[in-house]
Amino acid sequence: MSATGTSATPESAVQLLAEALKGIEERDALAAWIDWSRLDAMPARQREVVKRLVHGERVDAIAAAMFLSRSTVRNHLSAAFRQCGVHTQGELVRLFMRPAYQPVKLSA
């Protein structure tokens, strides 16, 4: 449940991320926090769709910008879900938003 009392959907999570990113003047400032290495095995168009999603674009906007149908964009995302072992757009975005550097927990 969200603060408004409604269940959050993956699309709303992506939309919230997109709104948060609007405040960043340079998207390149985010580069240090995005691990793009998972994209290496993806075909070029699929890779572009995933990058645009991670940067906060919605399916309709991705389709228009890349001159693709919405269903083609969804097909690219479905293939990316399978390759990355996730099931939703929100999970895919979170996967790429993890910092490349993961601190090691030290036992006490």
Image: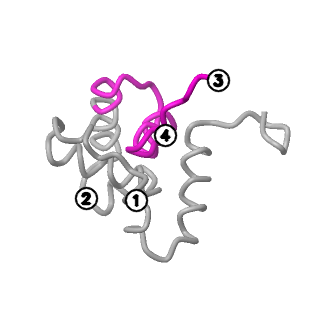
The amino acid marked with disc number 3 is: Ala
What kind of element bears circle 1? Answer: helix
Picture quarter containing residue 39? top left
Going from the N terminus, do you reach mark 3 or mark 2 first? 2
Looking at the rendered image, the disc whose residue lies closer to the viewer, 4 or 2, is 4
Q: Tag 4: residue type? A: Arg
**In the image, 50: left or right of 33?**
left
Q: How far apart are marks 3 and 4 (CA)?
A: 29 Å
Q: In percent of the image, x 27 and y 29: which residue is there?
A: 79
Separation of disc 1 and disc 4 at Cα? 20 Å
Q: Are marks 3 and 2 in contact (CB under 8 Å)?
A: no
Q: What stretch is highlighted in magenta?
A: 80-108
Residue plotted at (30% across, 33% down): 80
Quadrant of the rendered image containing residue 102: top left
Q: How far apart are marks 3 and 2 (CA)?
A: 51 Å
Q: Is residue 91 left or right of 23 when viewed as pictured? A: left
Three-letter code, disc 2: Met
- Which one is earlier in the sequence, the residue at label 1 or at label 3? 1
Numbered badge on residue 108 = 3
Which residue lies at the image location 49% right of the left edge and 40% below the top edge?
Answer: 94
Q: Mark 4 points at which residue?
A: 94
Q: Residue furthest bottom?
A: 25
Q: How far apart are marks 1 and 2 (CA)?
A: 8 Å
Q: Which mark is residue 19?
A: none
**Disc 3 and disc 4 in contact, CB within 8 angstroms:** no
Q: Is residue 82 left or right of residue 8?
A: left
Checking the image for residue 66, the label placed there is 2
Q: Callout 2: 10 Å neighbours few (<14), some, many (20+)? A: few
